[in-house]
Amino acid sequence: MQLLAWTVVTRAGRVLLGQRAPGRLHAGLWGLPGGRVEPGEALADAAARELHEETGLLARPDALAPLGVTHYRTPEGRGLSFFFLAEDLPGTPRALDATTAVTWADPDSLPGAVLPWLPRALRVHWRERRPLDETL
């Protein structure tokens, strides 16, 4: 089972999104900073690491607020996505590693080409603060 950690970074009511780089799964689509949890790595540590690798922003793992978890199934297998919240982080995000661009987006008006699960994940875990979702 694959474990993924994502960070919902918010500032002034907007959500930070990164556009996935060519050669990556879902290249060109916008999504949250995040990715695979390494063996032995704590979930919040993975979320903070991926956030820094993809945007340059620093967040202390213990300052990330858990939002929820989603069980998912894909043709490649199944896994769990863990979502964390980071509000008003200092610094200017930039496109690094697996991203070609970053933007602050209105969660009610996301760019057209987003990861298919993103609108639901933002609604369920961030807006409605429901901790468990099994439908992605």
Image (cartoon, grey):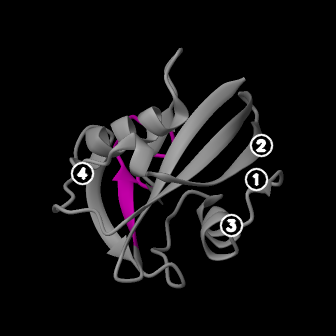
* Dot 2 amino acid type: His
Region rendered in magenta: 15-29
Q: Are marks 4 and 1 in contact (CB under 8 Å)?
A: no
Callout 2 environment at 10 Å: few (<14), some (14 to 19), or many (20+)? some
* Dot 3 amino acid type: Arg
Seen from this angle, which residue lies furthest right? 134
- Look at 33% across and 73% down and name the residue there: 104
Q: Which residue is mark 1?
A: 136
List x then y, in percent, for residue 95: 22, 51
Q: Which residue is mark 2?
A: 71
Of helix, strand and loop, which one carries label 3?
A: helix
Mark 3 or 1 closer to N-term?
3
Near-viewer residue (38 or 90)? 90
Q: Which residue is mark 4?
A: 57
Disc nearest the viewer among 2 and 4: 4
Q: Which residue is mark 3?
A: 120
Q: Are marks 3 and 1 in contact (CB under 8 Å)?
A: yes
- Look at 45% across and 33% down and name the residue there: 46
Q: CA distance from mark 3 to mark 1?
A: 8 Å
Q: Is residue 17 magenta?
A: yes
Disc nearest the viewer among 2 and 1: 2
Callout 3 environment at 10 Å: few (<14), some (14 to 19), or many (20+)? some
List x then y, in percent, for residue 136: 76, 53
Mark 4 or 1 closer to N-term?
4
